[in-house]
Image (tube, rainbow, N blue to C red):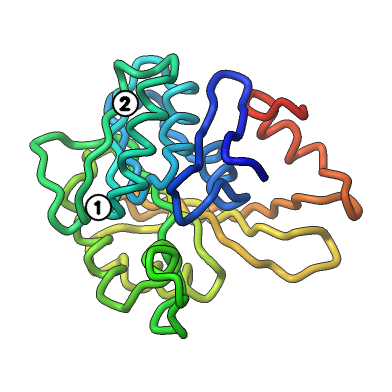
């Protein structure tokens, strides 16, 4: 994949970004939703792709993005500036634990690092993007609970094991899962990701299965429909 990834309404330059555009990010950007968000927060924005996908979909919303890695934050800022949504996008070069604002967000999203206490990637910046420790998720949940509007929702994508752990710990911050999307590569594979929606309301959880491929190399109609407003291929 080259350094420039072209979408229907914007382009993403991935130069200097440890984590490139991937399936997790675009799935979250396309799935995460709220009836009418005025303020959106993208935690760990990387290239800025999720923030721009949400800015494209929610024309009235202002999107804040937080990124701890300085080169990635600078690149995301450039991508934002060159987009059609430049006046509604802002990147903050800061650790989420140190992010301060008086705003409350109706929609918060995160495609976070998820290899908890695993062998660290020798490339340090990629390690920050992919790896974390147990405290990170506790801090993430604490900050989400502080920043989420009363009627807001928090969407996150994680591997199955980490998603389960997050759901257990989220209750301590009065965040309850309302929807879990079980993501499969195809019908013959085991579930490899969960997209979870949290809110302050304790409700019955809606479960959905989502398959990316119909057969090898052929996307499902569901995947194509989900991403048709973004990907040039659909």
Tell me which residue sits at (63%, 59%) in the image. 182
Q: Is residue 133 above or below residue 107?
A: below
Residue in front for this viewpoint, 110 or 76: 76
Density class for disc 2 (Cα within 10 Å; few <14, some 14-19, many ≥20) is many
- The numbered mark at residue 36 is none
- The numbered mark at residue 89 is 2
- Image coordinates of residue 123 in percent, x first then y, are 45, 70
Tell me which residue sits at (8%, 36%) in the image. 102
Q: Is residue 73 above or below residue 198?
A: above
Secondary structure beneath label 2: strand
Give the mark, 1 or 2, whose residue is nearer the N terminus: 2
Kindly identify which residue carries mark 1. Answer: 144
Q: Quadrant of the C terminus?
A: top right
Secondary structure beneath label 1: helix
Tell me which residue sits at (31%, 65%) in the image. 170
Of tags 1 and 2, the one toward the viewer is 2
């Amino acid at each position: 994949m080259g350094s420039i990834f072209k979408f229907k309404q914007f382009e993403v330059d991935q130069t200097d970004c440890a984590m490139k555009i991937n399936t997790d990010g675009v799935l979250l950007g396309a799935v995460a939703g709220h009836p009418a968000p005025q303020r959106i927060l993208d935690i760990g924005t990387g290239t800025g792709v999720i923030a721009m996908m949400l800015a494209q979909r929610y024309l009235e919303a202002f999107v804040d993005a937080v990124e701890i890695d300085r080169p990635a934050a600078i690149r995301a800022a450039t991508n934002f500036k060159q987009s059609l949504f430049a006046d509604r996008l802002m990147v903050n070069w800061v650790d989420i634990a140190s992010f301060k604002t008086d705003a409350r967000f109706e929609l918060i999203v995160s495609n976070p690092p998820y290899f908890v206490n695993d062998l660290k990637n020798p490339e340090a910046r990629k390690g920050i993007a992919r790896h974390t420790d147990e405290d990170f998720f506790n801090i993430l949940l604490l900050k989400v609970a502080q920043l989420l509007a009363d009627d807001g929702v928090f969407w996150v994508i994680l591997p199955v094991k980490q998603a389960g752990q997050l759901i257990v710990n989220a209750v301590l911050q009065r965040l309850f899962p309302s929807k879990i999307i079980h993501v499969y590569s195809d019908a013959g594979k085991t579930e490899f990701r969960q997209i979870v929606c949290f809110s302050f309301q304790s409700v019955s959880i809606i479960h959905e299965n989502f398959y990316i491929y119909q057969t090898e190399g052929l996307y499902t109609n569901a995947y194509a429909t989900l991403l048709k407003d973004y990907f040039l291929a659909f």
